[in-house]
Image: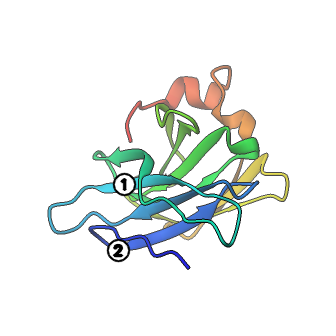
Amino acid sequence: MKTWDFPTAVKRVEFNEDGTKLLGVTEKRMGHLGTIVVLDIVVDVEAEQSDEKVMTIVCDESKATVAGWSYMSKYIIAGHEDGSVSQYDGKTGDLLYNSPVHELNTPITDLQWSQDRTYLITASKDKTSKVRTQMSFIPSSPILESQSGGKC
């Protein structure tokens, strides 16, 4: 069994589709910024797992409250404390888009994927749930062209 240690509480964890990567969302506390961390996983119960983080996404604009992998681990989608949703490149961690989805400053409290991971639903403290498709996160989407914020 493997235990990973982090400087602050881990609020959310999720394996990617094939179980080879694990992401964790950490709290912003005690001088530490909130992050999304990614670790490689060896798919063998007898294998030794690495402590090394292969990617760390620092969320300094608005802390991530939830995150998950899109289809084929192509993207990491995160919901934030300010009500926005961000899309990051699943290999590099680069921020691709950020879009307000819920009322400003109403935290996203949950994010769940469809079985094929092509669309997701968010829940927020603004008392709404909203469905988003992967198409909502591509450059030709009028939603993001007019609302892209470029922040974490």
Mark carried by residue 44: none
Q: Is residue 110 above or below residue 78?
A: below
Mark carried by residue 9: 2
The residue at the far bottom in this view is 1
Q: Would residue 144 be seen by someone viewing this image from the given angle?
A: yes
Q: Residue at x 46, y 32 (%)?
A: 94
**On the rendered structure, is 91 left or right of 73?**
left
Q: Residue at x 67, y 26 (%)?
A: 141
Q: CA distance from mark 1 to mark 2?
A: 11 Å
SS for callout 1: strand
Dot 1 surroundings within 10 Å: few (below 14), some, or many (20 or more)?
many
- Please tell me which of labels 1 and 2 falls first in the chain: 2
The residue at the far right in this view is 116
Q: Would residue 124 be seen by someone viewing this image from the given angle?
A: no
Q: Nearer the viewer, residue 94 or 51?
A: 51
- Place of residue 140 in the rendered image (x, y in percent of width and height, measured from the top left): 68, 20
Q: Residue at x 52, y 51 (%)?
A: 78
Q: Quadrant of the N terminus?
A: bottom right
Q: Is residue 87 above or below residue 79?
A: above
Q: Amino acid at mark 2?
A: Ala
Q: Nearer the viewer, residue 42 or 96?
A: 42
- Place of residue 86 in the rendered image (x, y in percent of width and height, measured from the top left): 51, 43
Q: Are the residues flagged by discs 1 and 2 in contact, CB closer than 8 Å? A: no
The residue at the far top in this view is 140
Residue tagged 1: 35
- Place of residue 38 in the rendered image (x, y in percent of width and height, measured from the top left): 49, 52
SS for callout 2: loop
- Place of residue 113 in the rendered image (x, y in percent of width and height, measured from the top left): 73, 58
